[in-house]
């Protein structure tokens, strides 16, 4: 398919069905001449324009009963989506009319995804951006669309290209040292070489982490409720879902496993996770109630130490995999000072949630940590503000840690693993002070694997697999 990227193609670019307008898209060196076959020739410039233009004209050919209005959009080579001369005919939506226009253009019908394929082959997009176009088309939720648009803007390709450039410079330095080995002039010390390879490995691991965290549009971000026992986590879990999923009890330690459910707010879906209370938090922060509303029931309610240890480990594991932690503290059990003590040392991807706010005495004011959110799950107070904060934080984190369209993640996991293995091999060779020939070979292997992701290294099989998933006209 990709060997035929220099002829001129045409296709209907809009979806089938009713609508106000439809678009016929043309790309290739004969695009300007072809459009003259279906529109009023007198309305077009004699020469092909050298800059983008929009021309209001009419469809016109022999046998057409009436002239139908249309707009012709033109982009010259090098300034269009595909990198070639592109013409779009925007006219009334009518399936038979579109097919008649395609037939009269006398051009090869475009294959699925061929316009985006040409954009890739002409350097307008890398492969991750091309896949993001498909992600935009297939997006079912606002979050899917945001991930695809970020990837289209270079959210994944940019860091990979920067890493590839860094490795290219490193390989050049290593091989330059080989060329001048007889001169006894070291281009790189072993220490500098090890530092640069280690740095590249860390950057690659960060990119891999982003792929794993946002591995596909079916993987929702995880929002995990954590905190000491009886902090109101299960009540808050049920309130956020508007359903009774978790067992609620005044006895600390009631939740012995973690529950999950999907919550959607303002078009953003996330997985909400309720966990068992962390006994270690109760032990490390001395309770100091802000008022006499403090609950005097101090029963543990947890079984033997082995069960408690497993519960604690399960909660810690759930917290470590969280995109966002909702750190819950019972305002009737802990003073602002006690909460602030723990908050200052906690994991950064968190929101501080102060529960049971309805039990605070109205006549007193408290100086809670900045950014904390007061809620009363039983009275539905503060829940909208909390949901807004959750969505805002998830979107913000999504913008700073690259999201990945599912098709990109599936294609790239193996290449990223091979690149990581090659860099690890290079590090081991450096530690053993092996020949720089072997080190350069390992680095080039990593470069090749990264190039498969962005498209510097590709085959017809890879391109066919990617672009065959597109619909015609894209």
Image (cartoon, grey):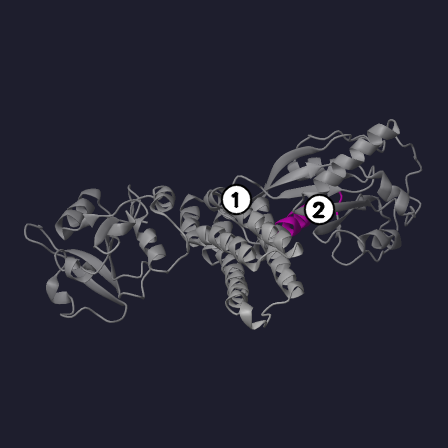
Name the residue rendered at 83%, 28% in the picture.
Answer: 307
Q: Is residue 12 left or right of residue 142?
A: left
Mark toward the viewer: 1 or 2: 1
Q: Is residue 114 left or right of residue 231?
A: left
Image spot of residue 269 (x, y percent): 57, 42
Disc ID at residue 314: none
**Residue range corresponding to the magenta coloring:** 375-392
* Vertical side of 253 occupied by 358: above or below: below
Name the residue rendered at 34%, 42% in the picture.
Answer: 468
Q: Which residue is mark 1?
A: 413
Depth check, front residue: 457 or 308: 457
* Vertical side of 103 occupied by 181: above or below: below
Q: Which residue is mark 2?
A: 325
Q: Is residue 287 left or right of residue 379?
A: right
Image spot of residue 466 (x, y percent): 38, 44
Depth check, front residue: 2 or 292: 2
């Amino acid at each position: 398919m990709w060997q035929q990227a220099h002829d001129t193609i045409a296709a209907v670019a809009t979806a089938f069905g009713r609508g106000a307008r439809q678009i016929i898209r043309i790309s290739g060196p004969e695009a300007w001449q072809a459009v003259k076959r279906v529109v009023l020739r007198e309305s077009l410039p004699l020469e092909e324009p050298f800059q983008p233009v929009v021309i209001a004209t009419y469809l016109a050919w022999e046998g057409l009963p009436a002239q139908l209005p249309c707009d012709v959009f033109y982009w010259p080579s090098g300034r269009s989506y595909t990198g070639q001369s592109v013409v779009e005919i925007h006219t009334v939506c009518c399936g038979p009319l579109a097919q008649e226009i395609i037939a009269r253009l006398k051009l090869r019908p475009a294959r699925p995804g061929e316009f985006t394929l040409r954009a890739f082959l002409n350097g307008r997009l890398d492969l991750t951006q091309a896949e993001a176009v498909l992600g935009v088309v297939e997006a079912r939720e606002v979050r899917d669309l945001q991930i695809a648009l970020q990837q289209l803007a270079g959210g994944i390709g940019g860091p990979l290209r920067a890493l590839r450039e860094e490795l290219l410079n490193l390989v050049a330095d290593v091989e330059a040292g080989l060329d001048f080995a007889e001169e006894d002039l070291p281009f790189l010390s072993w220490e500098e070489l090890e530092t640069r390879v280690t740095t590249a490995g860390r950057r690659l691991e960060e990119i891999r982490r982003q792929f794993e965290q946002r591995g596909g549009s079916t993987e929702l971000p995880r929002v995990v409720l954590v905190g000491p026992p009886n902090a109101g986590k299960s009540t808050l879990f049920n309130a956020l879902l508007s359903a009774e999923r978790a067992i609620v009890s005044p006895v600390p330690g009631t939740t012995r496993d973690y529950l999950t459910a999907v919550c959607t707010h303002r078009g953003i879906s996330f997985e909400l996770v309720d966990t068992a209370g962390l006994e270690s938090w109760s032990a490390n922060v001395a309770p100091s109630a802000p008022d006499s509303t403090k609950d005097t029931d101090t029963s543990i309610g947890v079984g033997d130490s082995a069960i408690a240890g497993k519960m604690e480990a399960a909660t810690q594991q759930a917290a470590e995999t969280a995109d966002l932690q909702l750190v819950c503290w019972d305002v009737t059990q802990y003073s602002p000072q006690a909460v602030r003590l723990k908050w200052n040392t906690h994991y950064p991807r968190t929101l501080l949630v102060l529960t049971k706010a309805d039990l605070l005495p109205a006549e007193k004011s408290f100086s809670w940590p900045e950014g904390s959110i007061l809620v009363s799950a039983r009275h539905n107070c503060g829940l909208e503000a909390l949901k807004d904060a959750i969505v805002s934080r998830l979107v913000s984190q999504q913008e700073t840690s690259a999201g990945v369209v599912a098709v990109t993640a599936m294609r790239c996991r193996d290449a990223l693993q091979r690149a990581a293995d090659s860099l690890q091999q290079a590090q081991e060779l450096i530690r053993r002070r092996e020949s720089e020939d072997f080190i350069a070979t390992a680095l080039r292997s990593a470069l090749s694997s990264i190039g498969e992701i962005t498209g510097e290294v590709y085959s017809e099989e890879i391109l066919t697999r990617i672009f065959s998933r597109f619909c015609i006209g894209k």
